[in-house]
Amino acid sequence: MEIISYNISSCTQEKVNYLLNQRADVYVVPEIAKDLELLPEYEMEYLGDIPSKGLGIIWRKGKGEIPDWFKDNYKKLSYAIPLIYDGILILGFWPTNYKQNKTYTKLAKEIIDKYTPHFSNFSQCIITGDFNLYHKENTPNKAADIIERDKELQRLGFKSVYHDCENESIGHESKNTFFMQFKKDEPFFLDYTYSKLPVLDYDFIDNPWEKFSDHIGQVIDI
């Protein structure tokens, strides 16, 4: 199974067409728009306060399903969407503070705490997306720090796939996934994949054209 996780920023149909033409099995897409044309073999679940910018999870028809319990009060979380695909729980993750006076760290904790009971029901779980969290030792930002969430996920049996594969510690990444307003001198590591089990391969996708996104994408092979 191949998963592509990509905050495409300022969603357009052209960007979505590019993603779907990569023929992955599952896509986690922060900042996607709700009303889009999909290739006929795909379907999407959308979560967002506005139709132009939310979180989407896209998968091959007939291969995955959104669990029934998500339709209850889980939709109130800003934002996370679960998909069960080939017996794997994939959680699209984008803690976002639209209309809420909450920090990214608090929103992320709310999501993790809510989904913790479900993680134990699956031998393999993948959490992937734009976490809106980072760590810089010289410029700490408690409102958007990943350290405590990383410790919490490790206690639940997860590892950050990038950091595990590259043998790097959080805050000391040799690569970055986000460049503020496309400025190369303002890099951050915001996009993560956490997994309970080892994955077959993990890599980044460089933007296919200029100003495609201020993030870069993740490719996860399970």
Image (cartoon, rainbow, N blue to C red):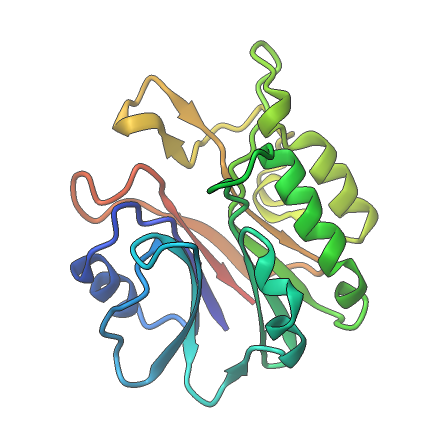
Q: Residue at x 61, y 15 (%)?
A: 140
Displayed quadrant of residue 141: top right
Residue 25, percent across and down? 43, 74
Q: Which of 211 and 118 is in front in this view?
A: 118
Q: Which of 31 and 182 is in front in this view?
A: 31
Q: How many labels does the image show?
A: 0
Task: Tell me if residue 221 can be seen.
Answer: yes
Place of residue 128 in the rendered image (x, y in percent of width and height, measured from the top left): 54, 54
Left or right of 113? Residue 184 is left
Name the residue rendered at 66%, 51% in the picture.
111
In the image, farthest residue toward the top: 138
Q: In this view, does 145 lie above or below 55?
A: above
Q: Is residue 163 left or right of residue 61?
A: right
The answer to whether residue 143 is above or below residue 46 is: above
Res 91 visible: no
| 168 left or right, relative to 9 | right
Q: Residue 29 or 45: which is nearer the viewer? A: 45
Occupied quadrant, residue 23: bottom left
Q: In which quarter of the image is the C terminus?
A: bottom right
117 in relation to 160, above or below:
below
Residue at the (32%, 65%) spot, across then down: 34
Q: Residue at x 65, y 72 (%)?
A: 72
Q: In this view, does 34 lie above or below 104?
A: below
- In the rendered image, residue 180, in percent from the top left (x then y), is placed at 34, 27
The spot of residue 39 in percent (x, y) is 25, 79
